[in-house]
Amino acid sequence: MRVLVVEDHATLAGQLRAALEEAHFVVDTAPDGEEALFLGETEPYDAVVLDLGLPRLDGLSVLRRWRSTGRAMPVLILTARDAWTEKVAGLNAGADDYLTKPFIMPELVARIQALVRRSHGQARPEISLGRLMVDTTGGRALLDGMPVKLTGLEYRMLAYLAHRAGQVVSKTELTEHLYAQDFDRDSNTLEVVVGRLRRKLGDGVIETLRGQGYRLIVPGA
């Protein structure tokens, strides 16, 4: 899953990035509203952390312009202490959640995880697919109740496919959601990762549809 962090305070932006990456998200950052607007309009993010007090273009204006052009990714806004008017304005502009500064980092991560789950129609952090269970909070997978040892990229691919279980996901979509903007994206890497997941989970878990992409099916169903 891929997240955009929009925060002009460099130290806080770095802390947000580190916490979200530790929770298995791929993270892009933007230090001002103009760059945030561009990235949000051109890149397919699964969620956004958006500070409202930004240089060049304020966060509310960014959010309103995203929503006016049909960008529907979940957005969590960061507001100043006791600024209830900012919270109301942000929610009215299309935000999905908010946190007041200063905040506890684990709470922000948990809220982003919840927003991503809900955007994919998942109510619980555990995605049960027959013999396979993906724990999106713990960042792990279990097969027949036993932990499966996965690399970071293997887990991110499995989690994204699990959120879209039964649906065909193209290579382009996977690439856009598994790698950050500045990463050298090589679609051939996806085939290698799929091969490793099949060896670890069994051949009947990830289906290849030639010319279309991949689909996670329910093991044992």
Image (tube, rainbow, N blue to C red):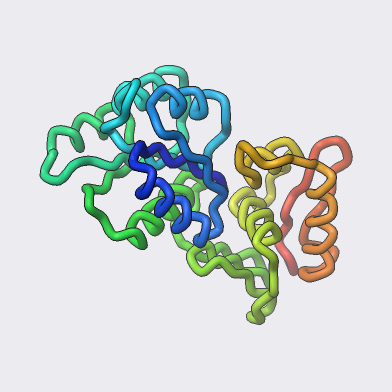
> Which residue appears at 32% of the width and 35% of the height?
95
Residue 135 coordinates in the image, percent (x, y): 54, 67
Quarter of the picture containing the C terminus is: bottom right
Give the mark count.
0
Residue 70 coordinates in the image, percent (x, y): 47, 22
Name of the residue lying farthest toward the right: 210
Left or right of residue 77: residue 25? right
In the rendered image of this protein, does residue 55 appear above or below residue 136?
Answer: above
Q: Quadrant of residue 37?
A: top left
Residue 120 coordinates in the image, percent (x, y): 52, 46
**Foreground residue among 139 and 182:** 182
> Which residue appears at 81% of the width and 63% of the height?
196
Q: Quadrant of residue 123?
A: bottom left
Residue 184 coordinates in the image, percent (x, y): 73, 40
Q: Quadrant of residue 127?
A: bottom right
> Which residue appears at 65% of the width and 44% of the height?
179
**Foreground residue among 142 and 185:** 185
In the rendered image of this protein, does residue 92 appear above or below residue 22?
Answer: above
Left or right of residue 221: residue 159? left
Left or right of residue 208: residue 57? left
> Which residue appears at 38% of the width and 43% of the height?
10
Left or right of residue 175: residue 188? right
Name of the residue lying farthest toward the bottom: 146
